[in-house]
């Protein structure tokens, strides 16, 4: 049921209960379904937070594997925690291929 919750975070409690009856042939109380949804949501959100904690590692790995590329990372400090804003990447291969393009002149 976690997969359903990650795809549809607004999954209703009654839908969770109905899926439990269909899949495992057991009845689940409202409070158990509510706690299961909350635990699954925390697990999904936690994985996103963990990935964003490693965004600097990702930027450094890109620079290591693509030397002379341009990477800009914007992070904002909110209540003592870093909040991701934007990530700009301009790879060296793209720079080189763009420079070698023919100029185009357009007239209206």
Image (tube, rainbow, N blue to C red):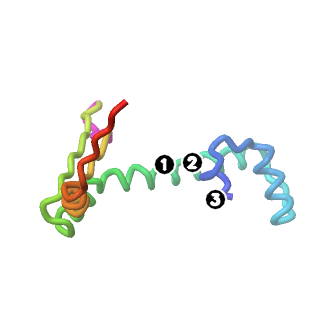
In the picture, the disc for residue 45 is: 1
Q: Which residues are magenta?
A: 79-84
Alpha-carbon distance for marks 2 and 1? 6 Å
Residue receiving disc 2: 41
Instruction: Give the image location of residue 48, x and y in percent.
Output: 43, 51
Callout 1: SS:
helix
Q: Which circle, 2 or 3, is nearer the viewer?
A: 3
30 sits left or right of 22 in the view: left
Near mark 2 (Cα within 10 A), the count class, few <14, some 14-19 or many ≥20, is some
Magenta part mainly helix, strand or loop? strand
Q: Quadrant of residue 68?
A: bottom left
Q: Quadrant of the N terminus?
A: bottom right
44 sits left or right of 58 in the view: right
* Farthest residue, direction bottom: 65
Instruction: Give the image location of residue 28, x and y in percent.
Output: 80, 53
Callout 2: SS:
helix
Reading the chain from its start, which is encountered first: label 2 or label 3?
3
Q: Is residue 63 magenta?
A: no
Alpha-carbon distance for marks 2 and 3? 10 Å
Closer to us: 79 or 105: 105
Residue name at image x 21 percent, y 69 percent: 65
Alpha-carbon distance for marks 3 and 1? 13 Å
Residue name at image x 28 percent, y 38 percent: 81
* Farthest residue, direction front: 107
Closer to us: 93 or 51: 93
Asked if the residue at tag 1 contacts the one at tag 2, i.e. Cβ–Cβ closer than 8 Å, the answer is yes
Instruction: Give the image location of residue 108, x and y in percent.
Output: 37, 30
């Amino acid at each position: 049921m976690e997969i359903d919750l990650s795809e549809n975070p607004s999954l209703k409690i009654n839908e969770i209960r109905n899926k439990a009856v269909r899949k495992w042939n057991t009845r689940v109380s409202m409070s158990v379904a509510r706690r299961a949804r909350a635990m699954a949501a925390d697990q999904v959100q936690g994985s996103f937070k963990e990935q964003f904690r490693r965004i600097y590692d990702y930027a450094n790995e890109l620079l290591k594997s693509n030397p002379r590329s341009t990477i800009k990372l914007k992070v904002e400090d909110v209540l003592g925690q870093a909040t991701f804003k934007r990530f700009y990447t301009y790879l060296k291969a793209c720079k080189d291929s763009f420079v070698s393009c023919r100029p185009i002149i357009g007239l209206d």
